[in-house]
Amino acid sequence: MRTWVSSSFLTIGAITAALAVFGLIVAFAGVDPIQVWILLFKGAFGDAFSWQNTLQRAAPLMLTALCVAIPARAGLTIIGGEGALVLGGLACAALAHAVPLPGNIVGSVMVCIAGAVAGALWIALAGWLRQYRGINETISSLLLAYVAIGLFKHIVEGPLRDPASLNKPSTPALDEGLLIGTIAGSDVHWGLVVGVVACLAAGLWLRVTAGGFALRVVGGNPRTAQLVGLPATRLILLGCALGGAAAGVAGAIEVAAVHTSANASLIAGYGYAGILVAFIARQQPVAIIPVAILFGGFGAAGSLLQRRLGLPDASVLLLQGIAFVFILASEALRDHNWRATYIRIMGFDPPAPPKEKAA
């Protein structure tokens, strides 16, 4: 309990420090930082429209954060969720274009499964390179993301390009029956529910199932995993595949619920923002939900900062980058002996407890 409280305070402190530094930067630009802070939270959570925009942006963040969190529990640092997302969206559009699908929820599920398979295979490739070729998974997953984006652009602008898309190359639009609708009475699509359910399911799987426990053992102590005979390589590939599948589903949902086709708008940085969300949530799938909502809100507030204060819409990316730096810095303080620091600063060392007298 004490560890959880300490971690929460460090995380809140890191985000607060990031907001303070961001306010200092905009102050040098001649903008009132207090007004910036107010508009940030007003644009994210100020009214029903802001909430809907926030939740819609939070949906892909939950899934791309899982692409980091699940492999992390197996001991891998995967940061290539952007590649899995764009390939998931491409697979969704490609399947709908190549195969006649039922124009109902079955067809929607099928295009999401196609996205999941594409994402799973792509991130599992990074795990395979680590296990069988000794290539660092952080570097390989990042480079594979650039390869995926290049492959995405080549196919969208070439073999799958819709001739009607002149100024903005896109694949043919999905049929109306394949599109994912919105939750009744709102503008938020059902991808939010998928993201929440995926985070809860991942948390339960890691916590209460034998497979999830085995994955955590492999990530926490590989030597112990080998001694007890756990199939470490198989579990690592499974963790990578599950994480990649989550990011692939995010891409498929963005195509089927937001863009209706695969185009350059899909490369929106959700995969990279998911890294930040996962680190702030300390790789805990359930904790990803509120963190994704918070950072979805920051993204939603960008346009309000631009309209009201003349700041660039991308200024929230600067805030996210600062927050990422402070979160990484806070990790170094997580196990710090604060009592020893207090004693060193104050020059006061409490007396040792009295020794028991010998009988």
Image: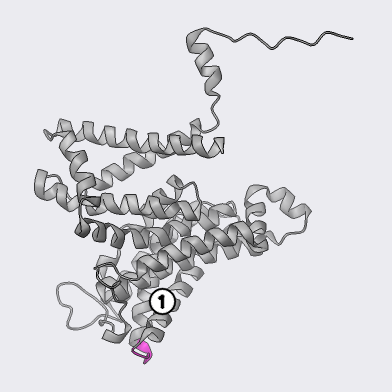
| Residue occupied by mark 1 | 112
Side (left or right) of 156 relative to 338: left
Residue 215 versus residue 77: which sits nearer the camera? Answer: 215
Q: Residues within 10 Å of mark 1 (few under 14, many from 20)?
A: many
Q: Residue at x 26, y 71 (%)?
A: 258
Task: Count the marks.
Answer: 1
When the figure is inspected, residue 62 is found, relative to residue 281, above or below; the finding is below
Side (left or right) of 329 relative to 157: right
Q: Residue at x 45, y 69 (%)?
A: 119
Side (left or right) of 121 relative to 212: left
Residue 292 versus residue 69: which sits nearer the camera? Answer: 292
Q: At label 1, which amino acid type do we have?
A: Cys
Residue 94's spot in the image, x, y percent?
Answer: 36, 81
Question: Helix, strand, or loop for circle 1?
Answer: helix
Residue 180's spot in the image, x, y percent?
Answer: 32, 77
Residue 125 seen by the camera? no
Residue 207 seen by the camera? yes
- Is residue 16 part of the magenta span, yes or no? no
Q: Quadrant of residue 185?
A: bottom left
Question: What secondary structure predominates along the stretch shown in magenta?
Answer: loop
Residue that protrudes farthest toward the right in the picture = 359
Q: Residue at x 68, y 50 (%)?
A: 222
Q: Residue at x 39, y 67 (%)?
A: 193
Residue 176's spot in the image, x, y percent?
Answer: 26, 85
Q: Which residues are magenta?
A: 98-103
When the figure is inspected, residue 10 is found, relative to residue 91, above or below; the finding is above
Quarter of the image with the N terminus is: top right
